[in-house]
Each structure stands twice: as structure tokens, then as C-alpha cells.
Amino acid sequence: MDLHFSFRFKVDETEGVSLGMTEDYIYWIHPRGVQRNDPKYALLNWHFHPGIGRLDAHVHVGVEFDGLGRLRELHLPTGMVPFEAVIRMLIDRGVPARYEDWDKRLEDSLILFRKSHHW
């Protein structure tokens, strides 16, 4: 599998405290070798892009089911999805971790993210 992502944020300075604020993100998971910009081949595709469309975070699932049609065309609602959650899911599904202490690295990153960030 290949993972591609786009993530934009800005720093909000309020009362002497700096917080990161997510403006938008897209995370794509594709079979290896598939062009990343072609959503018809994405296995999972998380989106949050309030400036150019929907205000809610959502996911597209790249499968088809009888009676439901192509799920990739549905905007299945999600909460905001931190990048660390996507990485953890991939490792849980068998993608090799780059570091032996990957779990601690992800947890530390997520703790720091939650302390210094708001949606």
C-alpha cells in the first residue's frame, strides 16, 4: 500500500499562546503503484476541506456493494482524523514500521498534537 497526504494548518496566536489549527487535509491509501491523484483507485480517502466543499470531515471507501453502489461516491462522516491515527491503522494492518519504538513515537506525537492544536 502507498500513503499520500496533503495537510494545511496555520498557527493561531491568542493571548500569548500559539496553537496549530487545521485548515484542511486529505489522506489517500492506494494499492502500490497506483497514481495518487486518481480517486477511483483509492482504498480509503479521508477528507476535510471546508474551504472548497463540505464542512464536515469524511471518508470515501473504494469498494462497491450490491444495493449500495460505489461507496467512494458517498461522504461517510468521521470526526477529525489525526495523521497519527492513519499511520497506526496501517501498521496494525501489517505495513512495516520504520522504527522499533513506533508506538511510543506515535503516542508522543499525538499527545503533543492534542496539546498544541485545535480543529
Image (spheres, helix red, strand yellow):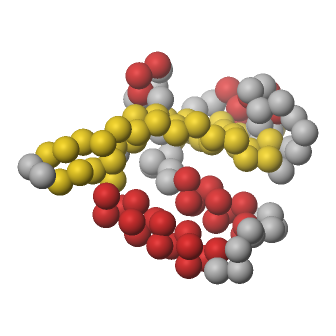
Q: Is residue 5 visible?
A: yes
Q: Is residue 33 left or right of residue 114?
A: right
Number of numbered tags placed on the structure image: 0
Q: Is residue 99 left or right of residue 106?
A: right
| Location of residue 106 with respect to 42 vertically, above or below | below
Q: Position of residue 110 (x, y in %)?
A: 46, 65
**Residue visible at 90% across and 39% down?**
33
Q: Is residue 15 left or right of residue 36?
A: left
Q: Is residue 106 left or right of residue 30?
A: left
**Residue visible at 47% across and 20% down?**
53
**Residue visible at 64% across and 74% down?**
102
Q: Position of residue 96 (x, y in %)?
A: 80, 68
**Considering depth in this image, is 62 or 108 the residue closer to the camera?**
108
Q: Residue furthest top?
A: 52
Q: Residue furthest front?
A: 16
| Location of residue 84 with respect to 29 vertically, above or below | below
Q: Quadrant of the C terminus?
A: top left
Q: Position of residue 83 (x, y in %)?
A: 55, 53
| Location of residue 52 with respect to 66 vertically, above or below | above
Looking at the rendering, which quadrant does residue 38 occupy? top right
**Considering depth in this image, is 61 or 39 the residue closer to the camera?**
39
Looking at the rendering, which quadrant does residue 76 occupy? top right
**Residue visible at 57% across and 32% down?**
75
Q: Is residue 59 visible?
A: no
Q: Residue furthest left?
A: 15
